[in-house]
Amino acid sequence: MQRVLILTFIPIIAIVLLGALVHYIGVQGFLFAWILNFMLMACVLAFTETLKSPLTSPYYNDKAWEHRGKIYESFGVNFFRKLLRWVGWEKLNKKSNPIEKNTKTLMQLHYRTKQSELGHSIIFGIVLGFTIFVAVKFGVFKSVWLFILNILLNLYPILLQRYNRPRIERAIVLSKRN
């Protein structure tokens, strides 16, 4: 019962925060786009952590068209990985989620890729909706920051999770053999 209440209140809180953000800052410019993305990240993270779904959908499976990650490499996912390392995200992430060399940790990492992809996909859709709204109502130029930050903060992380998951699955198979 408590879990259901929390899962109900998180979207309500997100809507209230979003209303305040729109009221006090407006929907145009870098500040709105930045705060919107990080506010949604906090709310979606709280939601997915509370939900704790097993995320067993076939959507998360490696697809033939992904060509073992080659398509993501052509979109520059390796450059994005280097960028994350350069800004310190990888070090921060490893500090909060250390990776040990055992199957259990690899399984948790595998689950986290699914959880992260789900969260970024939800945020991507919401921010895309705002991007389209701002582009139609105020002009395309006014939606540029929403577009750029949505690509950097949501689309590339989705691509990165899809790129890493099959590699982690192979490591799990090798770990189970040993």
Image: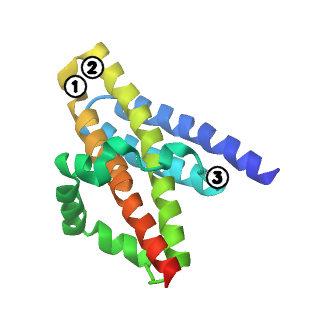
Q: Which residue is mark 2?
A: 135
Left or right: 58, with 7 as reference point: left
Name the front one of labels 2 and 3.
Answer: 3
Q: Nearer the viewer, residue 53 or 12?
A: 53
Tell me the tag on residue 142: 1
From this view, report whether residue 135 is shown above or below residue 56. above
From this view, report whether residue 77 is shown above or below residue 173. above
Indicate which disc, 1 or 3, sits on the residue closer to the N terminus.
3
Q: Amino acid at mark 2?
A: Ala
From this view, report whether residue 112 is shown above or below residue 64. below
Residue 97 is situated, as x and y percent measured from the top left of the image, at: 46, 74
Residue 124 is situated, as x and y percent measured from the top left of the image, at: 39, 38
Name the front one of labels 1 and 3.
Answer: 3
Cβ–Cβ below 8 Å for labels 1 and 2? yes
Indicate which disc, 1 or 2, sits on the residue closer to the N terminus.
2
Q: Which residue is mark 3?
A: 53
Q: How is the image coloured?
A: rainbow
Q: Is residue 153 visible?
A: no
Mark 3 crowd level (few <14, some 14–19, many ≥20, 10 Å Cα): few
Q: Amino acid at mark 1?
A: Lys
Q: Residue at x 21, y 52 (%)?
A: 73
Callout 2 secondary element = helix
Callout 3 secondary element = loop
